[in-house]
Image: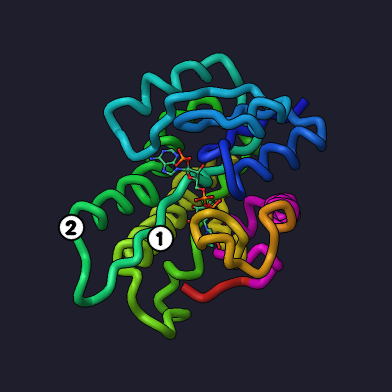
Amino acid sequence: MPVAVITGANRGIGLELVKFYVAQKWDVYALCRNSSDDLNESGAKIINKVDVGNPDTIPLALSKLKDIKIDLLINNAGVLGRDTIKEWDPHTIEHQFRVNALGPLLVTQCLLDQLKSGSKVAHITSRMGSLADNSSGGYYGYRMSKAALNAAGVSMAHDLKEQGIAVALLHPGYVQTEMVSYGGDISAELAASRLANVIDQLTIENSGSFWHSNGDVLPW
Ligand SMILES: NC(=O)c1ccc[n+]([C@@H]2O[C@H](COP(=O)([O-])OP(=O)(O)OC[C@H]3O[C@@H](n4cnc5c(N)ncnc54)[C@H](OP(=O)(O)O)[C@@H]3O)[C@@H](O)[C@H]2O)c1
């Protein structure tokens, strides 16, 4: 049974990714700060108290996974702030960096020994981290932190290639979750199945690419 590890698994896109892979008969480890009723009913193995924004607690929290080999790691947990040029707070921007950029880097580093040739790492980023695609401004902390995640993902693709581990940067689409006050244009369930389809197509040859969940390659 292939093994998937998914962060931010208690709700939104993360929860639907958990449900998708459980339905495909994967062994799923669902990482979250606090579980939810939906996650409790999903059939995944739940690891609570994984705050990806807290570098002091991640290594200990992830040590619970030390005996497993991982086929797929999905760094999904994320936060969005609505900073404007006039109104932003260094602490909330720093928080977005910690969760959106440093979190995936540290989670991946802590789980490196459990990845193997053929394993995949999928970072759920956003096209809002694209410089070329930024046609509307604002969202300073979110855009900056997702651009930083994209940079980390490309470095990881280079660094892990020799070990046969492929890395993808994935934009899920505009998805109906709490993050966007449920204003998206696709459901979290559809986003999860599209993301899984793109993850299926991830290989060591195309590692380091930035994809929309609809399969389009996005500009940096
Ligand atoms: N929705 C969209 O349109 C959209 C578009 C582009 C990219 N994305 C990306 O998709 C990913 C999932 O977002 P979503 O739409 O599903 O949003 P969501 O419903 O707000 O879910 C966010 C998830 O991240 C978790 N999280 C936040 N801070 C965390 C922390 N410090 N440690 C651990 N987990 C934390 C949340 O857990 P708690 O319940 O503990 O807060 C929750 O499980 C994010 O990376 C987001 O940036 C979403």
The number of callouts visible is 2
Give amino acid for label 1: Lys
* Depth order, front residue of 167/177: 177
| Residue 101 point in image, percent of width and height | 37, 50
Q: Quadrant of residue 86?
A: bottom left
Q: Is residue 70 above or below residue 135?
A: above
The 10 Å Cα crowd at callout 2, few under 14, some 14 to 19, many 20 or more, is few
Image position, residue 177 (x, y; %): 58, 55
Q: Quadrant of the N terminus?
A: top right
Q: Tell me if 108 is positioned left or right of 214 in this view.
A: left
Q: Which residues are magenta?
A: 192-216
The residue sitting at 33% across, 75% down in the picture is 138
| Amino acid type at image mark 2 | Pro
Whether residue 184 appears in magenta in the rendering, the answer is no
The residue under the point 25% across, 54% down is: 92
The earlier-in-sequence mark between 1 and 2 is 2
Q: What colour scheme does the image use? A: rainbow
**In the image, is 98 to the left or to the right of 175?**
left
Towards the viewer: 51 or 205: 51
> On the image, numbered disc 1 is attached to which residue?
146
Which marked residue is nearer to the observer: mark 1 or mark 2? 2
Disc 1: residue Cβ within 8 A of ligand 1's nearest atom: yes
Q: Secondary structure at mark 2?
A: helix
Is any part of residue 116 visible from this angle?
A: no
Residue placed under numbered mark 2 in the picture: 90
